[in-house]
Image (cartoon, rainbow, N blue to C red):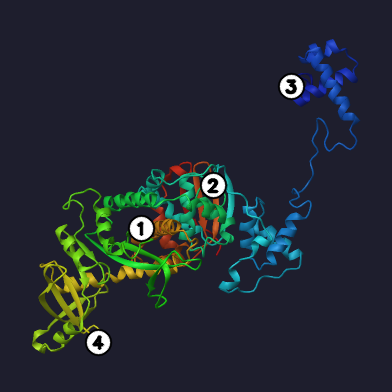
Amino acid sequence: MRDERHAYFLKPVTVAQKQYEALRAFFLENQSADEVAARFGYSVSALYSLTRDFRGFLRKDGADEDMFFASHTRGRKEKDCGGELTALLVSLRKKNLSVPDIKALADAQGHAVSERYIYQVLKNEGFERLPRRTAPDKDNKHILDVLTAPESAALTYEPEHFSTQGSIGVLCLLPYMKKYGIDKAILDSRYPGTKSIGTMSSILSFIALKLSSVRRYSADDLWCMDRGLGLFAGLNVLPKTAWFSSYSSRITRGMNLAFLKSLHAIWIKNGLLSDTINLDFTTIPYWGDASHLENNWSGKRNKALESMLAVLGQDPDSGIIDYGETGIRHNEQDDVVLEFLDFYRAGKAKADCGLKWLVFDSKFTPYGNLRKLEDSGIRFITIRRRGKNIVDKLEKLPNTAWKKIRVMNADGKGRMLKVYEEEVFIKEYGKTVRQIAITGHGKIKPALIITNDPEIDQASLIRKYSRRWLVEKGISEQIEFFHLNRVSSSMVIKVDFDLTMTVLAHNLYRLLAMNLPGYSHATAASLYDTFLRNSGEVEIQDDDIHVRMKKKRNLPALLGEMEQLNTVRLPWMNNHKLIFSGSSTT
């Protein structure tokens, strides 16, 4: 033991100890430079350089640290030496932000502080607990008066821990993108990237805003400092408004159409499209200088206004929206149904594409195009416009001409209707067509359904057309939840990109709904409020990303579904796995 203790001083191992012993022998023991250099393995010139640095250190007045020995201060390291952090926390509380909100914003700014520390600082500054806040109180629209959002940058996925408020649940949709190959469709698309943000992160930035029901791109809000939404896109935080506007200006209709075709192939491959597609128009208003736009009827506002006309094609069984296009001019809208057919088939033979029925309302396309659909092997179901002569004829029919049938609803309940079927000749169609008049549905005048399908029974025909209202429900959802009626630019191509991103966001919600028992028909807004609108903590580890979501009534159902996807590795997120669990707090 004695030899080991002597060896520690006579044979130093670390660089600092070796330098200290060499200087001690030179100055205190008065050994020559040659002797000290030989003893400690230095050259003479290196030893003189060391002595020069030592003299320079001694000449410094009030040096912060010793040249060889570090001083250690007892207790915790001071987090706020200059008071800047305390000033930031106080200013955020003055904006009516809760401690968890402040914690999430502090994490985005790079301040590693706990909620307990924030609470204690605010308590010391004389702040009481916040009263119960209403929803408007929680819309923190003015935090940028206090904070400057950090610049967006690609995540390095180094181990870290941070909090996020409001939309942590949207991370649950990322495994579905890998499961269905949507990530590959994005990477293979013609969408561009930027120098600092790649194609995948660019598209996911738009999707993150759509999924979280962000009000509009036109104003930076909490989302530009939400680490959870940033993680969704593989970034520290989402980009600011100017980036979204400039990026969408680079997108063409050809890029959107190619991407929709890639998604179409995914839906077909996974059996998410049936043999029927419902088609309908929707009006997207514009509130700026709309002199280049045409007037279109808006059912939501019950008037015609300068707007963009868009079309959506939705599967009635899965709810998947397969097709979308904006900027349709009046002289083009009659042939939209034929353009959709070309999109769906994309070079496939009639028998191979799987599409049998198209369902739409009476004003979607003229009768002449119905004949073209029949010649293309498509069965159509639509409503015939009711003229005065047709209504008079139906009213004069005896009661014995009407047949009573029961049409079953999705909830298992049936409804009695009276129907009258006949073959009618339509001049523009060029031949007779099957027509079924329906009454007893609460309408004053009978509804007229026409179809070129001679085999489908009356009840199935009526039920299939009634499900067309699903696409109207889907359109209403796009307007309310995805904010299609708040376009960000007068450029039609931007709106077309906005619609394409809306279609993908809507379909991600459909994929989630299909796997949540009892919620298969829930709207995106309902799914978001019930499951995904939540707060929590994220911990990035070497191999996994742990997402701990705060307690919520329906959280167990969501975690049960996520357990089946916790082995899915996400290549665009450095091949990490997302592990979801519940937090101990509410």
Q: Quadrant of the C terminus?
A: bottom right
Residue found at x 28% / y 52%: 270
Q: Earlier along the polypeptide chain: callout 2 or callout 1?
A: 1
Which quarter of the figure has residue 381? bottom left
* Residue 138 visible to the viewer: yes
**Residue tagged 1:** 511
Task: Answer left or right for 81 relative to 473.
Answer: right
Cα separation, mark 3 vs mark 2, equals: 44 Å
The 10 Å Cα crowd at callout 3, few under 14, some 14 to 19, many 20 or more, is few
Q: Which mark is residue 540?
A: 2
Cα separation, mark 1 vs mark 3, equals: 68 Å
Identify the secondary structure beneath mark 4: loop
Identify the secondary structure beneath mark 2: strand
Q: Earlier along the polypeptide chain: callout 1 or callout 3?
A: 3
Measured along the vertical axis of the image, is residue 219 above or below residue 188?
below
The 10 Å Cα crowd at callout 4, few under 14, some 14 to 19, many 20 or more, is few
Measured along the vertical axis of the image, is residue 122 above or below residue 438?
above
Q: Which mark is residue 444?
A: 4
**Residue tagged 3:** 4
The 10 Å Cα crowd at callout 1, few under 14, some 14 to 19, many 20 or more, is some
Cα separation, mark 2 vs mark 4, equals: 62 Å
Measured along the vertical axis of the image, is residue 582 above or below residue 179?
below
Toward the viewer: 451 or 201? 451
Q: Earlier along the polypeptide chain: callout 2 or callout 4?
A: 4
- Foreground mark, 1 or 3, reads 1
